[in-house]
Amino acid sequence: MKKILITRRLLRSCEDKAKELFDANFNLNDELYSQKKLIEMSTGCDGILSALTDKLDAETINQLPESVKIISNFAVGFGNIDLEAAKKRGIAVTNTPDVLTDATAEIGVLLILGACRRASEGIEKAREGGWVWSADMLIGKQLTGTRLGILGMGRIGQKIAKIAKSLGMIIHYHNRSKLSEEKEQGATYHDNLNDLMKVSDVLSVCCPASKETINLINKDTLELLPKGAVVTNVARGDIIEDEALIDALERRKVYAVGLDVYKNEPNLNPGYLKHKSAFILPHLGSATKETRTAMANLAIDNMDEFFKTGDCKNKVN
Ligand code: GLV
């Protein structure tokens, strides 16, 4: 039986599945392993089932035991892993696409709604009590007829587009390449980010984090947005330059933000906390029972497929 390290706790049924297939080493207290501890815990392991909280940078990967042949990431994103370093050491890296598309798109839409309709302020007021309905209380931005700019029209972006369209939004997108008409569903393609920014009353960041996308949303690109635009991010914090976005909020260039992901999670830039118009969530994109179960099962299946065949359809390096 192959020996594996599972760096974070999974839902019970998934841990049971892992036990059946592997000699699995569980992190019973669900503590965050330091890089040193993760290397120690991998001793004698054939694979690591990692989470997005594990920083598998080149330095860590280079110190992993020779026996480790696969890192199966329990996430669709893999910005926490240095793919090149893993490749150089002959370690396959896999991810969990598709199964989390719907859940993440739901949160993407929640961010749009929460930011546009001032949900944070509304929740605070409702909890405080003593509020009296009035015609102008917490007036927000209606989505009907508003232009939604989607940065990264992959699976999650497409699903957000579909839901947003049903809410009456007009969809624009920027992607490395134009989608087929069938996938575009009437959305307007922009072959560069600047053009997308100019028409985005609401921006939804949905692209993966990579060397090319880091800080794409910055002082210069934010300036191109229409005044009073809304910025949301369901992808990765690395894509946004926080200081520039907070400054844009302060100047009312940006009306509100809806964020689920941050640089240096969980230590988000405190500038966001000061703003009532920041609708913020703690990285809940895939957090439903169905989705977390499907993701963990896929991460386990990825390892199983790799051990049986030497390859895996969800290999990303
Ligand atoms: C979640 O953020 C994921 O990448 O799966």
Image (cartoon, rainbow, N blue to C red):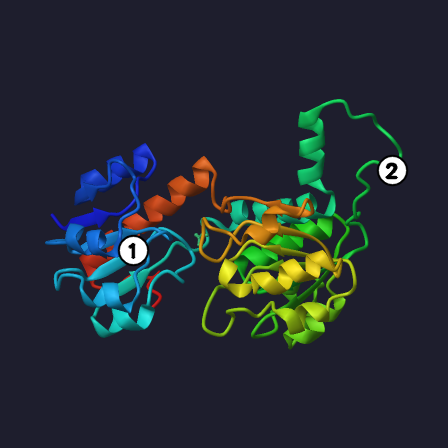
Return the disc, 2 or 1, that comes first in the chain's sequence.
Answer: 1
Name the residue that disc number 2 marks.
136
| In front of the other: 251 or 66 | 251
Which mark is drawn over residue 12?
A: none
Report the residue at 71% width, 57% height from top. Answer: 250
- What SS does tag 1 mark? strand
Q: Is residue 185 visible?
A: no
Where residue 10 appears, x then y in whole percent? Answer: 32, 39
- Mark 2–mark 1 distance (CA, rounded to whole Å): 51 Å
Rendered position, 266 above or below 213: above
Tell us which disc is closer to us: 2 or 1. 2
Q: Residues within 10 Å of mark 2 (few under 14, many from 20)?
A: few
In the picture provided, is 242 more to the left or to the right than 148? left
How many marks can you see? Answer: 2
Residue lying furthest top: 130
Picture quadrant where residue 95 is located = bottom left
Where residue 87 appears, x then y in whole percent? Answer: 26, 71
Looking at the picture, which amino acid does disc 1 mark? Ser
Name the residue that disc number 1 marks.
72
